Image (tube, rainbow, N blue to C red):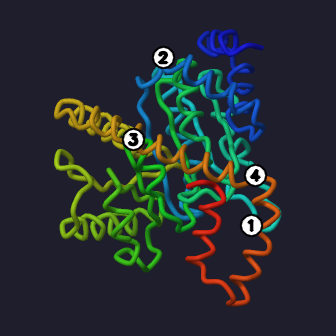
Amino acid sequence: MSSPDLASRVRSGDRATLARAITLIESKRVDHRKAAHQLVQELLPQTGRAIRVGITGAPGVGKSLTIDTLGTHLTAKGHKVAVLAVDPSSTRTGGSILGDKTRMARLASDPNAFVRPSPSSGTLGGVAAKTRETMLICEAAGYDVVLVETVGIGQSETAVADMTDFFLALMLPGAGDELQGIKKGLVELSDMIAVNKADGDNLKRANAAAAEYRAALHILNPRSPNWAPPVISYSALTETGIDELWAQVLAHREALTQSGELAARRREQQVKWMWAMLEDRMFARLRSDAALRAKLPQIEEAVADGRLSATLAVEEIATALGV
């Protein structure tokens, strides 16, 4: 199918074509990459209108259940929700389980939702290498809310903050490390902290944890001069506090839109995306240059044996690439 035809069917909201387009975006084949670039360019005028929310948190905090509950809540209100869920890839085999659809049972079967699990493939920040393009494809297909779930395993979360409008950090109550949980870099990127599992016997602990985070936030610099990150407690299981959570996302969007910061942030993200794509292109060239690939094992061995410094090795590789 040609790029214009594929773009037309994506715009019509055809789910099978959307899945096919995302597979094309994620492909590493050279011919597929060219077709993917053309497709994104074709669809660019239909992008940019969705609310983009990044969601992070440690494993076990309830990211998938939160997204399932929030997404179902939004589709009931008439929204079309796309979920880009990034699964951690094995450093040994490169494989991923891609089990997010089983953890988001309601959304996976919701006709107004689209759940796409993708392997992180070792990408820093726990965001799949092609998540930005995938997000644009989903927006062009008519999805007005895009939720990006990160791996949340302690890597830099800058990548997801640099592609979303609202960055939500989920926390656990009663873990005994509420203040330790305030990772300065993470919180300075966050637009809100939400303490999950505020139900049953956990309710008191969740509210106490939220109070601790609230107090700690006063000594940190917020991400935006136009928004003071709130701290809320909620329960993805009982759906308590989900309304408030989404109300804060909308309030943040309103505040940043009125100040002009949202448009400025989107512009900045586009430029960062360009540089990230350039880095990917350089690495792709490194992998595709047969002569250089043949030399790399010798260079690596020389560095490992201490016969060649890492600095000189980089210079040698860069020179071979003509950089």
Mark 4 / mark 2, whichever is N-terminal: 2
Secondary structure beneath disc 4? loop
Residue nearer the viewer, 210 or 226:
226
In this rendering, the answer to whether 101 lies above or below 90 is: above
Q: Which residue is mark 1?
A: 91
Q: Which residue is mark 4?
A: 289
The mark lying in front, picked from 2 and 3, is 3
Mark 4 / mark 1, whichever is N-terminal: 1
- Name the amino acid, label 4: Asp
**At 73% from the left edge and 30% from the top edge, which residue is drawn?**
24
- Name the amino acid, label 2: Gln
Q: CA distance from mark 1 to mark 3?
A: 29 Å
In this rendering, the answer to whether 212 lies above or below 264 is: below
The mark lying in front, picked from 4 and 1, is 4
Mark 1 / mark 3, whichever is N-terminal: 1
Residue nearer the viewer, 142 or 322:
322
Q: Position of residue 147 (x, y in %)?
A: 51, 39
Q: Position of residue 150 (x, y in %)?
A: 55, 53
Instruction: Give the position of the N terminus as an image quadrant.
Output: top right
Q: CA distance from mark 4 to mark 3?
A: 30 Å
Q: Which residue is mark 3?
A: 269
